[in-house]
Amino acid sequence: MKHLDEEELVLYHYGDAEDATSVEEHLKTCARCRAELAELTAVLADVSALPAPDRGDEYGEEVWAAIAHKLTPRRRVRSVFMLAAAAVLLAGTFLVGRLSTRWNAPPPSAQIRERILLVALDEHLDRSQMLLLELVNAPESTFELSAARELLHESRLYRQTAFRMGDLATTDVLDEIERLLLDVVHGTTSGDVLTARIVEQDVFFKIRILQTNVRRREEELKSQQF
Amino acid sequence: MKAIVADEVVGRARSGDQNAFRTLVEAYSRDVFRLAFRITRNEQDAEDTVQETFIRAYQKLDGFEARANFGTWLYRITANSAIDQLRRKKRHEDRSVPLDEVTAGGVGPGQERAVFGRQVRERVESALVSLSELERAAFVLRHFEELSLAEIGATLDITVSATKQAIFRAVRKLRVTLAKIPRTAP
Ligand SMILES: [Zn+2]
């Protein structure tokens, strides 16, 4: 009978042999292949014995501290256009003049309009969450006021839109975000107090739920379109 | 991966909850580091790989299927980040200098065992470093992480047969370097 070659032995060693029974039968009767397998096993045991440094329990926190600021909100569809489009199509009248010259395409269907709004709202929620999270993580830090102001402005727009569409659940969440942002922009409330309010009112949880609904609706519309 | 985190946390991280993602980072960092180190064989490279892995994971989280295993998914990203790290390094650096053999001369009898152990370790180390990125990754995933050949193929984006070949080459190089007994022809 033919001896087992190295590849067959490697496969057998790792439990990947196609026909383990016949390998075993050969090994039973062949001292040479048994020796070969023993040598292979010894080499691989030496490899196993090689230590890998272990990072301690706190390592995860270190990693988080190193990367947290590098995480950019996902779904970064630039919102200026999205927001403007959504505002023009659904809510605002004040932007119409400014954008109408650029909006020569035929009016999109109601479904497409809703999707545009949903995508923009989703992104708005992402960014609001990031800003509030920053506040909670470092209450004393000063961040860009202009960003907070922009978010406040957007939030108000979305709240009005949601209200007009009769979506009171969304209106409520946006209202809470708006009030927090207003305090951030005014700078009259301390970071600690704001943090306490964010936690107490479960703001992150509410945003998450809202986002889940927004995304579900978005998927729904997407599937209807085709 | 050893760490097990509730699906619920993974789900929350997917829907953009940064705190949930933080929980995942804290739960998996140690395991990710170990795997990254085994592939890169260098602590600094492993640290860089860990960070890159989580940043990539964060960006790709939308594409993660809720029903899949998060640990396995993270493996994939870790192994590929480690390979990328090695390739980047190769572009920027000269080939790493092989470790010097330890000389046993002048060592007292009590230390013989320790020296022998160290020599074996250094030989294994230099054998591993001599493997190509792909060979090392495939071997590490089979030997240490006990992934199936199909899983390794999926992780490294190669066929099962290419996976086997990579492992065969890795084992052969290890055996030649460590050669304890002469190899016999098939
Ligand atoms: Zn034989």
Image: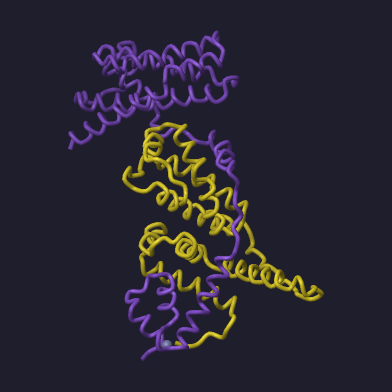
Chain colours: A purple, B yellow
Quadrant housing the N terminus of chain A: bottom left
**Figure quadrant of residue A14:** bottom left
Residue at the spot x=51%, y=75% of the render? A41
Say above or below: B171 vs A130. Answer: below
At a point 47% along the width and 59% down the height, the residue shown is B145
Up/down of A218 relative to A185, above or below: below
Q: Quadrant of the C terminus of chain A?
A: top left
Residue at 59% from the left image edge and 39% from the top image edge:
A62
Task: Provide residue B29's location: percent of width, then percent of height.
Answer: 53, 45
Which quadrant of the view contains residue B97? bottom right
**Image coordinates for residue B147, horizontal then vertical, percent:** 41, 60
Q: Position of residue A19 (x, y in %)?
A: 32, 77
Residue furthest to the right: B106
Which residue is pictured at 34% across the width and 17% down the height? A158
Q: Is residue A108 left or right of residue B29?
A: left
> On screen, A164 above or below B10?
above
- Report the front residue among A203 and B46: A203
Question: Residue B83 at x, y = what percent?
Answer: 50, 57
